[in-house]
Amino acid sequence: MRTIPFALALLLSSAAFALPDESDFRVAANIPQAAPGASGVVGCSLPDGRYLLWNGDVVFIQRAPGSAVFDPVASGYIGDPGFATLSFDEDYVLLGAGFGNGVTANVYPFDFNAPQDYQSGDEIVVPSHYAAAFLNSTLVAFDRGDFGSPAEIIVIDISIARSVRAPLTVLRRPESPARDTIVTKPAGSFSASVAVNGGTLYVADSGNGQYKSFSAASIINAFNTSGTVAWSAGTDIGTPFAYPLGGVSGVTVAGNLVMAGFGEIVEVNPGSGNVITTFDPAGSGPFYGMIYNDATEDFIAVEFPPSFGDPLIFHATQNGVAALPVIPPDSPCSEFDDIDTEFAAFIAQFSPGATDLDADTIPDTAMLELVELYSCRVNEDDALTFATNTAYDDNGEVFATEANAGALAAYSRIIPVLLFMNDAMQDAVLALLNGAATPLSGTYSTVTCTDTKNCLPLFVEDTLVSRGAPLAYEPYFASGDADGDTFTNLTEYENVVAMGGDDFDFAVAAASDRLDGTGGVSGGAGGCFIATAAYGTPMTDELGRLRAFRDRALLDSASGAAFADAYYRLGPAAAAWISQRPAARAATRAVLAPIFNPIAAISLALAVAVAVGLSARATRRTGTMQRK
């Protein structure tokens, strides 16, 4: 069965898998479709960071790095695109016409500095293939898929072929028929994308789900000495079927592998085998192809349609080809009403009366407020937001496969949350479920951080397998510091309680590095002084909406925090003035009436705060919000 030719891509920002905002992302109609008879589009990056694309006829070059415009520069390069790879010396691109007729196929050396249409004799006839990468300036390693036979890695000396301006067959060397077959994959194997980086050749067997690395020097030596390299001599990367089966499309500056295929695109540490990041831009797990940009560490990805001949779907940002959002498709943000209900029911069934399952002295309800706040943050490139949503998505998928998933269906939202909060919580929950004869046996994720810029789900085994130490700290635990302001969660919780605040006030303080729980953000009213004075209670629905906007949007940016800072400094005195004057209270409620437009409402509230504050000769009080 023929493997789908590995075509295209989606971009990441140049900061090696930085996390852009999902709102920037869209389907890009400007990227060219496959030519008639071709099954995909392939490409590579040029030395200056532009992309070169080939659709099986026309070659396109990106007008400038990051541009949405792809200019056609040459045509007539006919074939089913298998790969496009930059030469070792970065002076031309080799275009591979895929499987051809199943026996031979063409490759085209293409001079991107002086593009010209195809001329007869430009092609080099080679064995049918899937992908290729340069080992050095003259030798190219091809991943050859032979129908009915195991796939293999063959090496061809392109310099010999290029020295003759006529079709040249280099299928086999007369003196040694098997000389160019260097690695033979196991029975049942299929071809996949290959990559060379830092003297290492990365190869995959998509039929058996294996990824391996080989020393490029050993492959070159085998070619020069008419030898071979055993498949078993390669170094295993991860375990079989741990990653998408499309092969390695690129290697980051950090040395991580970028892989694409059915269901997802992943970044993998080849040493540990750990998945660093998982991408699903379409949110539906289709087959993805990729073009990786070595110059910028971006990539373009294509979603292949289920039926051959249907248009490819390219994903890119509004800036053309820029950054792929990595927010997972499933987040707990919109489900917290159900999550809170499930948590109350979970406690009632498994541990009646419990308030602190992980024994960190902070009520679990307060930590759940913090989880909700982070999962819903407007600034979704926040590292802890990404780690939170990814862990929830991962744990939800694992939970769905559990033998007891049906018996625990009423808790299908809260259990994935509890299991990622910290090790102690995971242990407590698993113990409760085990004691109730509904054990879980899967592998779940916890969220850990080294600092506020580096948080990720840490994959941990169930209670039967020992776990390693966290990276540095667990942000959803008393000793953690979710906002990185040097105050632990426990300290901020105790500060808020001392000020008379509630769980939500703690979550706000713990999520903002501009607050430590000792300022006006706490005190029962949650810091909404003006609205509290106007409505007379901090518990109204209207006030809750204002608080939610403040904490999930306003405090999530520097300008918003400055705005809130002024509000908190002027607010208390203004609120005292309003609360003593019924007419002022009524006027303020009228100002806050457009509650469904929270931005306008809070802006007007601030204006009232300033006006009445000045009228009442309100004294500016410093220290309400501590800036770090």
Image (tube, rainbow, N blue to C red):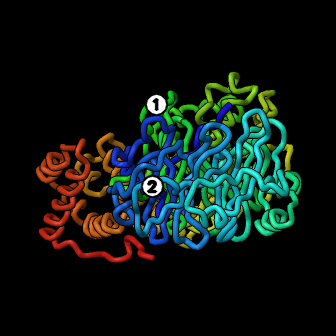
Mark number displayed over residue 309: 1
User: Which x, y percent locates residue 490?
Assistant: 60, 62
Q: Is residue 306 left or right of residue 528?
A: right
Tell me the SS state at disc 2. Answer: loop
* 265 left or right, relative to 235: left
Q: Secondary structure at mark 1?
A: loop
Residue drawn at the location 38% of the way across and 46% of the way down: 32
- Residue 264 at x, y percent in the picture: 58, 43
Residue 119 circle label: 2
Query: How many numbered marks appear?
Result: 2
In this orientation, does residue 164 appear? Answer: yes
Residue at 69% x, 27% y: name it.
Answer: 405
Q: Amino acid at mark 2?
A: Gln
Disc 2 crowd rating (10 Å Cα; few below 14, some 14-19, many 20+) is few
Task: Tell me which residue sits at (21%, 72%) in the image.
Answer: 618
Q: Amino acid at mark 1?
A: Gly
Residues 142 and 387: in front is: 142
In this orientation, which residue lies closer to the viewer: 4 or 527? Answer: 4
> Which of these two is toward me, 252 or 610?
252
Tell me the quarter of the image containing the C terminus: bottom left
Q: Position of residue 444 (x, y in %)?
A: 71, 44
Is residue 31 shown left or right of residue 282? Answer: left
Choose the circle earlier in sequence order: 2 or 1.
2
Which residue is located at x 77 percent, y 39 percent? 189
As measured in the structure, the alpha-carbon distance from the residue carrying label 2 to the one carrying label 1 is 28 Å
Q: Quadrant of residue 448?
A: bottom right
Give how far across and how far down residue 38 sits, in percent: 49, 38
Residue 616, placed above or below residue 597: below
